[in-house]
Image: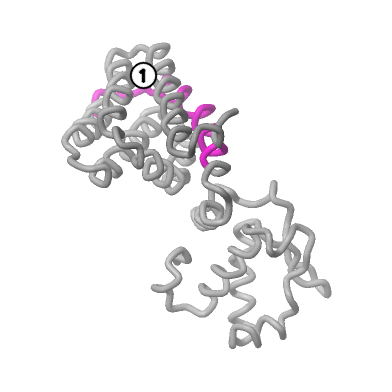
Amino acid sequence: MDYRNLEKRKSQHGRIVQELGMQIVGGTLLPGQRLPAEPSLCETYGVSRPVLREATRVLVAKGLVVSKPRVGSIVRPRDEWHMLDPDVLFWTVNSIPEGEFFRALLTVRQIIEPAAAALAAISATDEERVRIAKAYARMEQAKTATDLLEPDLEFHRAIMAATHNDMLAYIGNMLSLALTESIKFTSRHPNTHALSLPRHKAILTAIEHRDALAARQASVVQLDNARQDANSILGGAALET
């Protein structure tokens, strides 16, 4: 079920998940606060209790609320939310300032991606190196920032897969939405294509040479430069650590 496209959604409970989820992530409904009573929500959305309860179960599965007998549904503390859930990520992107989101995302990327690149350099099979190289070749062939998006994503996914660590591969897949938003954001820089290619080429070359230290350093440089690009887009201060 895709809850992210409200206008395309057909299910009643999907609309409720979207709207309540946005209220929770956006801070209209605060941690520890109870959701409105079932009769009130049923009246607001024009749905039956079974439909409302199905929506509540989805919010529970995303870690946003906990349901307690005779109490109702309570918003959980933010540190208990499933932040890698695609919907929760999407709601987060749309509910906090750009600078705050990208600062948090870049910090996560700086922790994970250099280590993943180093591991891929020593773990990747020949076929996996070819996959990374093909993604980079498609980046070179891209004519516009929009064309660059999918091969850029594939480049990073291929590196995660080449670590041969199922958890890292899973994290990479779960972060795809956030990474998409990050790439779209930095693509607003006027020289995004010219700047992006040599940074990614350095990572590819290190992986092809099975040089873990060089792969790690190339990834660090790429992310440092991404932060600088984002700073220039936001006016300088928003992404400072």
- In the rendered view, does 26 fall on the left or right side of 197? right
Q: Which residue is drawn at 60% across and 51% down?
A: 82
SS class of the residue under badge 1? helix
Tell me if residue 66 comes above or below residue 237 in the rendering. below
Residue 85 drawn at (x, y percent):
53, 52
- In the rendered view, does 9 fall on the left or right side of 199? right
Residue 52 drawn at (x, y percent):
62, 78
Q: Mark 1 points at which residue?
A: 121
Check the picture and name the quadrant holding the C terminus.
top right
Q: Residue at x 51, y 73 (%)?
A: 14
- In the rendered view, does 169 fall on the left or right side of 150? right
Tell me if residue 108 comes above or below residue 40 in the rendering. above
Nearer to us in this view, 90 or 126? 90
Most prominent secondary structure in the magenta stretch? helix
Q: In which quarter of the image is residue 33?
A: bottom right
Residue 127 drawn at (x, y percent):
24, 28
Residue reaching furthest to the front: 235
Q: Give the range drawn in magenta.
A: 102-128
Q: Which residue is drawn at 83% across and 75% down?
A: 70
Q: In which quarter of the image is residue 188?
A: top left
Tell me if residue 22 comes above or below residue 228 in the rendering. below
Residue 230 drawn at (x, y percent):
45, 35
The amino acid type of the residue labelled 1 equals Ala
Q: Would you say residue 122 sits in the magenta stretch? A: yes
